[in-house]
Structures are given as C-alpha cells and as structure tokens.
Image (tube, coloured by chain):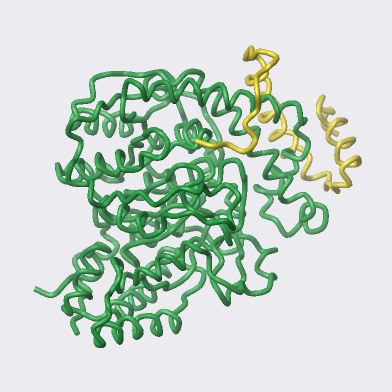
Chain colours: A green, B yellow
Amino acid sequence: MPIDLAEATAAEIAQAVRSGETTALAVTEAALARIARLDPLLGAFTDVTAERARAQARAIDAARAAGKPRGALAGVPFAVKNLFDVKGLATRAGSKINRERAPAQRDSPLIERLEAAGAVLVGALNMGEYAYDFTGENLHDGASRNPHDTSRMTGGSSGGSAGAVAGRLVPLALGSDTNGSIRVPSSLCGLFGLKPTYGRLSRARSFPFVASFDHLGPFCRSARDLALSYDAMQGPDPDDAACVNRPAEPTLGALERGADGLRIAVAGGYFRQGLTPEAQTAMVHVARALDARRTVELPEAHRARAAAYVITAAEGASLHLDRLRQRAKDFDPAVRDRLIAGAMVPATAVNRAQKFRRWYRERVLALFDEVDAILAPATSCTAPLVGQQTFRLDGVEMPVRPNLGIYTQPISFIGLPVAVVPVPLKPMPIGVQIIAAPWREDIPLRIAHALEQAGVAAAGRPALEGSRKVSARK
Amino acid sequence: MPPKEPLDDFIMAAAEALALPIDPAWQPAVRQHLEVTLTFARLVEEFDLPDDAEPAPMFRA
C-alpha cells in the first residue's frame, strides 16, 4: 500500500525515503500541492519556498543514489513560524514593519540543523504580530484558521505552525513559545507540541519577544516526531546568549520505556479553576490512563502568571520602543496598545517580578524531588471562534487574547520543559500539559508516547482533507 | 466629554517623558492594558520577599 503522504508522520516519511519507497522530491511535490490546495482555507503559510525545497529534495535523492548516508529526517517537509530567519526572506515576525527589512542572509540554526538531518524547508508560517498573541489572528496576513473547524481560531501566536501540521500540509513545523505560543495552539488544533527547557534550543537568528521567556520548539502529529526533530535541533550555540553549553541528550531511544516507573501527579489549585467541561474531561482521561492519583500544588501559581504578565509587558515594550515612537500606526492596534502600556510599567514592578521568579522557581523545583512529571491543562477551553473577543471562565467574562495562556504562563515563567498531548474530543480537540524538571525533556516525551500508544492522545485527522488520499511513489 | 480616569494624567506624562506619541483615540485601550498590568504588579508586590531576595534576570533552569 503506498504511503499516505498527507497523513504520514515525519518518521514514516523519512523511513520511506531512506528505503526508496518514495523520493524526497515526490514527498516535497506532494506537500507543495497540499499547500496550494488547502492553505487558502487555513491561512497558515505566508511564504512558500518551493524552488528551494525542490533543490534540497533533489540533493537528498542524489545523495541516496550515490549511496551516501541519509539523515534521520530525510525528505521530511517542514515549515517555520515567520520569526525564524530564512535566507532570502525578510523576517516579518507577523508585522507590517519588519517585512521592509532586508532579506535574511542566513537561516536560523534550527533550520540548519533540521536540514542537516535531511528535512526540507517548504516555507514560513503565519503568526500573531510580534508574537504578542494567543489567538493566531493577524491584522496584516489574515487569521490562521483551525483545520478542525475553519470558523475557529488556531490559537497563537504560532497559529500558522499549528494549522499547517493539523491541516496535514506538513508533518513538522517550528514555533516559538514565550508564554504559551506552542502549547496553546497545540491544544486548540489537537497536536503534539514541545516547549523544551529554557536555554536548550538555540534562538539565534529568530526575532525575539521577551528574552527572559523566549523558547523555540516543534509541532508534530506524534510524540516520536517530537523526539526525532527535537533531537536533531539540540546542542550548544554561542550565538544565543541563553543557550547552554550542554551536550545533546537524545530522547528518541527512551520513548519505548513509556511511563513505567514514573511518579506522575496532577496540578491542583490554580490549575483546576476556570476549566470548561472539555478541559476537565481531557485531564481525567489522561490522569486515569497514567494512574496519576496524586495532586501537587504549584505554590502561588496565580502570582507567577501575574509576574510573567508584568515582565512580558515591560520587556516587549523595551524591544519595540523605537518602533512605537516612529511607526506606531503600522502596528496592529491590539498589539500596539499593550506595548505602549508596557512601556509605562515601573521598573520596580519588573524587578519585584524577577525576584518573585527566583522564589517560585525554587519552590516548584522542590516538587520534583517527589514527582517526575506534573499534568496540567493546556487551555481552559477548546478553540474559540475567529474574531471572538471574550469568553467565560468560572462565570466571569474575560478577554480571549490575553487569557488563553493562563495555565501555560506559570510554567514557561521558570523555563520548565513541557510536552502537550492532544486529547481528540469531539467536535474539537484539547490538550494537556506534561511538565518535568529542567533538562528532562525525555520524561514528557516518554509519557506522551505512552498516551499515544494507549489511544488516549492522538492528533485526529480533520474533515478538511476528508477521506481524500494524497500519495506518491517513486 | 467622558470623565478623566485616574491613570490618564500618568499616561500622558509618561508618554511625554518617553517621547512616545499617543493618539488620544488609543488612550482608553492603553489605560485598560496598563490597569490590568498594574493590578498584576500589585499582586506580585503584595507577596512578602526578604530584603536579600535576588532577581532572576538571566534565568538558568
């Protein structure tokens, strides 16, 4: 039976290319055809790098024909949030202003590392302006739309990344996560997402948002693909001041160990407030499958979220102050007005938030003496409608844009590694966070894989593609 | 004319001090965002930390 290139995981595609079942060029052409057909519905791509992709694919096929070794991601199409530098493209970061910049001279290191493993870059992806967003909507490029229901949002700010993977345009995409921008869209689009430990993956040659919290990571449709792509991107990089000088610690080989022997608890208190029935159901399914009966409290999580909010406002404003002075009318007003307010936050508030951050980090890390992983909701609800301004949490009407990340912010605040697993509820999926101690990405990935094997977590196929099969053979 | 909100004078003064031009039409939204952020800042400040508490400006996990 020919490989279904729309549905195949990155691991399956790489295996098919390595074995000669298909070629990298056939895989690339199939991805480009899906993008051409489906992206008008999804608004995921802002740039398609077709000729570059074909050249890379031909090089991979030539290497195979010459008997040279193929990488772990041989022929796997991927795309990146448009805040990653892509040689030859202006790094727009979702903005009108940045698209006037000169084209990038060099790819981001994560693109270089994925391509070194044989992956094929097919384009750049839509995002919320300057990543200050949880919706995936963009004033300049249009909204990213959720493949499970195109009237609904993807979540953001890495909205195009999630839409492209959930919509089966590519099996792998990269995004950034400052306060939840990988985890929120993973939840709303029903995907596996990984936000590694702060400092693990290089952020060099990507457009920043909040240096204290910025992370980069992958979106996939399986836990194995998360591990495969994450392993290919690990390693020190002196070009990112926060990237640690730590050797790569591969995770792929550990997946089959599953969740056996791991002490898994559920986050209580703050993380049980404001949940819709769907979010509660997802938590129950995952906790039950893992026999996670213990509850732990992340102390002062509400204050951690508040401190993350304050630091984000101030650092984001600092980054954009000159643009606010000179080009204020070229911002999305929803972003501009938050950034202007951020410029007026007293330095004392930011300093206190950073002091609190150290206190909170010590208390939370102490929890990992007693547990190996903590489960928490990724979002309070399934995907709101595109353009929806408010939603109700615990009976209180709240604005959507800043509040979709209430469960993700207290975690990225202290840089912990998190995998999101998708629970395929109907009609819309929703995600659960699996949180571990710093540098233990292997643990959430093992648990995510175990949940996938058990059928509890799955990146369900949207009706968008229907039952149509897109396949290619050599 | 709508009544002046308590933060409006601060916003205008800060905008001038920062050389940050603000269209009057943006002011209500800026005020709303600043109110939320300052509410969160107060929540953090209410938490009692010792005088020797160190900030974590460059976080190492």
Q: Position of residue A125 (x, y in %)?
A: 48, 64
Task: Please give left or right for residue A472 compared with residue A392 in the image.
Answer: left
Task: Please give left or right for residue A342 compared with residue A266 in the image.
Answer: right
Q: Position of residue A459 (x, y in %)?
A: 26, 51
Q: Residue at x 47, y 51 (%)?
A: A386
Task: Please give left or right for residue A83 compared with residue A97 in the image.
Answer: left
Q: Residue at x 18, y 26 (%)?
A: A291
Q: Quadrant of the C terminus of chain A?
A: bottom left
Q: Position of residue A52 (x, y in %)?
A: 45, 81
Q: Residue at x 21, y 65 (%)?
A: A12
Residue A189, above or below A27:
above
Task: Please give left or right for residue A182 compared with residue A3 in the image.
Answer: right
Q: Position of residue A171 (x, y in %)?
A: 31, 63
Residue A42, above or below A317:
below
Residue A341 is drawn in which quadrant? Answer: top right
Q: Quadrant of the N terminus of chain A?
A: bottom left
Number of dots carrying numbers: 0
Q: Foreground: B22 or A104?
A: A104
Whether residue A353 is visible, yes or no, is no
Q: Foreground: A84 or A367?
A: A367
Whether residue A94 is visible, yes or no, is yes
Q: Foreground: B24 or A21?
A: A21
Q: Foreground: A50 or A369?
A: A369
